[in-house]
């Protein structure tokens, strides 16, 4: 029986571990934190429950496929429910647009501030739908491990269809004129940690994905997905070691042979690293085993944006808040100048609020709200330091802004008030420079030719996570983990047929 170590218990690592265990591999999953989930954690205080991390769930098939491949039904582990409206967008001029699947309702709402943009809505959504179809057929459901994979004629035709050198913002400006509409649909670039003026137009597909595939909630909170994956992994015999840190991947003859950890050493045939590629190379592999070319190549990638999180538990309901809420600033473009150029927290940030107690009454006590408040932030750099003083000041700026848009008492009346910075994210998960999505998708190269899922230098070393193909986001990294596992299984079977072992 082949032995596999999975480093990191995020959704990508869990997905890989489950698929490999279901195929008969001896799998050990190692997680440095006291709980699984990676960047998705659960935080509880004073009767309030918060999902610390991803909260917008789409593409339920990516989760269902993990269970299906193991001979299980996801319905026996998780309960999803649709969220309506999908997201409430509030703009600086007072306009509000609730994202809903109905085209006529969307047109009516947009027409309140821009009749011209309302007329263009259907044509934009049709274009977004074509982008999604191409992505599904050519990019999302396969790994790009070799030049043969990357030069596949079907893939090349897909590139031609999606116009990879056209930015999302450029595409949007061909359809819309008003800054509200441009901000509302430009925000999809941030779903992959990027700038709408630099990320490719293919991310317009997310508008179609949310409209047609809907946005889902999970009964008990998003972290319930992690618990369900952990339960399934245990049922399949995966050995899970928490509070255990990998300290070195041992390489001999350019092949993985063992993993050293704080709880002992393990001989292995294969390692699946569910973490940032650069972190793995820098901290777990001896310098002699990582060629300088590979090191320089990986270091050349620009990190994605990070996030500044404020958790508020308050004995109050806010009637204007739905499950997912976005408050846009007057100058949306300036946010990305601050993040990617000045590398400082945005002076006037867009604020996202997940108010899951709006949909799931068991998340918080009656009459109270559990608010996950996210402001996009720059990855860690010398331009900004998150210390006690700067953290408190930025949190107060955010809470003051929310008071101004009608969330009265959010600062003075809060029973729970906790913050989580990019520095905290780096310390907890070893995310390179505190980036949420690994590398950004700013540009053609970083979007379509990300670091490989298989090490080119070390046999038996694989990567599953947002840094690698097909990219970041909760359902995508889950899909990535399964694709990596299935490729390992496929190649091992091929070797067996050829009599390699």
Image (tube, rainbow, N blue to C red):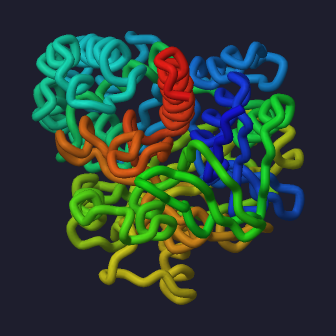
Quick check: 271 left or right of 289? right
Residue 496 in the image, given as x and y percentages of width and height: 54, 20
Q: Can residue 449 be seen here?
A: yes
User: x, y (%) of residue 252?
Assistant: 48, 58
Q: Is residue 424 left or right of residue 35?
A: left
Quadrant the C terminus occupies: top right
The answer to whether 126 is drawn above or below residue 317 in the figure is above
Residue 321 visible here: no
Residue at left offset 25%, top offset 39%: 449
Q: Quadrant of residue 469?
A: top left
Q: Position of residue 481 (x, y in %)?
A: 55, 34
Using the rendered view, name the quadrant where residue 125 is placed.
top left
How many callouts does the rendering have? Answer: 0
Residue 104, placed above or below residue 39: above
Most foreground residue, 418 or 164: 164
Q: Position of residue 164 (x, y in %)?
A: 15, 30
Front one among 111 and 343: 343
Write the residue at 61% across / 56% down: 258
3 on left or right of 337: right
Pick the quarter of the image with the N terminus. top right
**Which residue is at the far bottom?**
389
Residues 260 and 219: in front is 260
Instruction: Judge whether 351 appears above or below 344 on screen.
Output: above
Give me the residue at 66% from left, 19% from top. 64
């Amino acid at each position: 029986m082949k032995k596999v170590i999975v480093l990191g218990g995020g959704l990508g690592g869990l997905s890989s571990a489950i698929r490999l265990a279901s195929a008969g591999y001896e799998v050990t999953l190692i997680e440095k934190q006291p709980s699984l989930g990676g960047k998705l954690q659960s935080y509880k205080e004073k009767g309030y429950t918060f999902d610390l991390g991803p909260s917008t769930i789409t593409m339920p098939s990516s989760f269902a496929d993990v269970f299906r491949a193991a001979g299980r039904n996801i319905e026996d582990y998780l309960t999803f429910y649709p969220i309506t409206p999908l997201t409430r967008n509030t703009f600086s001029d007072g306009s509000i647009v609730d994202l809903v699947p109905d085209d006529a309702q969307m047109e009516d709402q947009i027409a309140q501030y821009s009749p011209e943009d309302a007329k263009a809505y259907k044509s934009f959504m049709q274009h977004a739908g074509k982008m999604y179809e191409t992505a599904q057929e050519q990019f999302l459901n396969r790994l790009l491990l070799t030049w043969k994979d990357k030069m596949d004629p079907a893939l090349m035709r897909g590139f031609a269809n999606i116009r990879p050198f056209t930015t999302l913002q450029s595409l949007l400006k061909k359809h819309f004129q008003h800054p509200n509409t441009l901000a509302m649909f430009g925000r999809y670039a941030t779903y992959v940690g990027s700038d709408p003026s630099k990320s490719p137009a293919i991310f317009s597909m997310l508008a179609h994905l949310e409209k047609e595939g809907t946005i889902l909630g999970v009964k008990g909170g998003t972290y319930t997905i992690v618990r369900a994956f952990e339960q399934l992994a245990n049922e399949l015999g995966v050995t899970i070691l928490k509070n255990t840190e990998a300290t070195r991947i041992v390489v001999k003859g350019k092949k993985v042979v063992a993993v050293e950890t704080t709880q002992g050493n393990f001989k292995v045939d294969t390692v699946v690293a569910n973490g940032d590629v650069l972190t793995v190379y820098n901290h777990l592999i001896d310098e002699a085993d990582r060629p300088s070319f590979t090191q320089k190549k990986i270091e050349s990638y620009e990190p994605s944006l990070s996030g500044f999180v404020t958790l508020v538990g308050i004995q109050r309901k806010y009637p204007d808040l739905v499950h997912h809420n976005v408050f846009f600033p007057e100058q949306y473009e300036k946010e990305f100048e601050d993040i990617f150029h000045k590398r400082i927290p945005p002076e006037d940030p867009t604020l996202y609020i997940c108010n899951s107690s709006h949909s799931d009454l068991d998340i918080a006590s009656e009459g109270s709200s559990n608010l996950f408040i996210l402001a996009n932030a720059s990855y860690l750099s010398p331009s900004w330091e998150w210390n006690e003083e700067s953290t408190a000041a930025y949190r107060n700026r955010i809470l003051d802004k929310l008071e101004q848009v009608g969330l009265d008492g959010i600062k003075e009346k809060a029973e729970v008030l906790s913050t989580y910075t990019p520095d905290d994210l780096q310390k907890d998960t070893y995310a390179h420079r505190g980036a949420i999505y690994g590398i950004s998708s700013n540009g053609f190269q970083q979007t379509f030719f990300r670091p490989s899922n298989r090490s080119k230098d070390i046999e038996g070393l694989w990567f599953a996570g947002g840094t690698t193909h097909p990219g970041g986001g909760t359902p995508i990294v889950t899909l990535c983990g399964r694709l990596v596992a299935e490729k390992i299984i496929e190649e091992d079977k091929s070797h067996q047929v050829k009599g390699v072992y």
